[in-house]
Image (cartoon, rainbow, N blue to C red):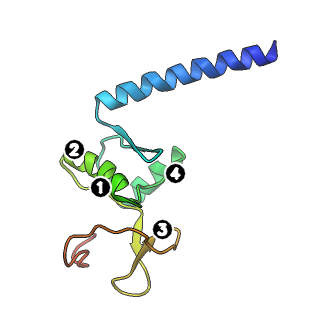
Amino acid sequence: LVDSEVGDMIRQLEHQISRLAGVLSLEKKITASGGKIFATNGEKADFQTTLKKCREVGGSIATPRNPGENDAILYFVKNFNTYAYLGIKESLIPSNFQFLDGTQLSYANWHLNEPSGKGKE
């Protein structure tokens, strides 16, 4: 009986998640790449607020690790006509960048001479 009830609850949750994903897709607030889900609430915020919001929902700021993930982030940039924060920071070595957890970048798709260090990149 317990397994049956748990199974029913799981099916109900899966259905709710599916419906929510459908709504978010229609609003262009969710996309996927390589088994990862990329989402936005569409609101503008500073980096620290963005980092906090991502952590609150159990996620992290997007960090493109391949061209497909880069395209998933670019999807939001184009649809919302805005910038996107990346989970990347400059290391102690100037012009050397790393993921927020300190690991070295394994993928980068910078424009020529970028990041330039001008402004708040």
Above or below, 98 against 77 in this view is below
The residues bearing labels 1 and 4 have C-alpha atoms spaced at a distance of: 16 Å
The residues bearing labels 1 and 2 have C-alpha atoms spaced at a distance of: 10 Å
Q: How many marks?
A: 4
The residues bearing labels 4 and 3 have C-alpha atoms spaced at a distance of: 13 Å
Badge 2 element: helix
Contact (CB < 8 A) between labels 1 and 2? Answer: no
The residues bearing labels 2 and 3 have C-alpha atoms spaced at a distance of: 25 Å
Where is residue 59? Give x, y as percent: 50, 49
Badge 1 element: loop
Contact (CB < 8 A) between labels 1 and 4? Answer: no
Q: How crowded is mark 2: few (under 14 residues within 10 Å), some or many (20 or more)?
A: some
Q: Check disc 3 and give the amino acid type.
A: Leu
Q: Name the residue under label 3.
A: 100
The residues bearing labels 4 and 2 have C-alpha atoms spaced at a distance of: 22 Å
Above or below, 80 against 3 in this view is below
Q: Mark 4 points at which residue?
A: 55
Q: Name the residue under label 1.
A: 84
Badge 4 element: helix
Above or below, 101 against 116 in this view is above
Where is residue 116, by image quadrant?
Answer: bottom left
Badge 3 element: loop
115 left or right, relative to 106:
left
Q: Residue at x 75, y 14 (%)?
A: 4
6 left or right, relative to 48:
right
Q: How crowded is mark 3: few (under 14 residues within 10 Å), some or many (20 or more)?
A: some
30 left or right, relative to 100:
left
Where is residue 50? Give x, y as percent: 40, 53
Whichever of callouts 1 and 3 sits on the residue coming sooner in the sequence is 1
Q: Check disc 1 and give the amino acid type.
A: Ala
Residue 80 is labelled as: 2
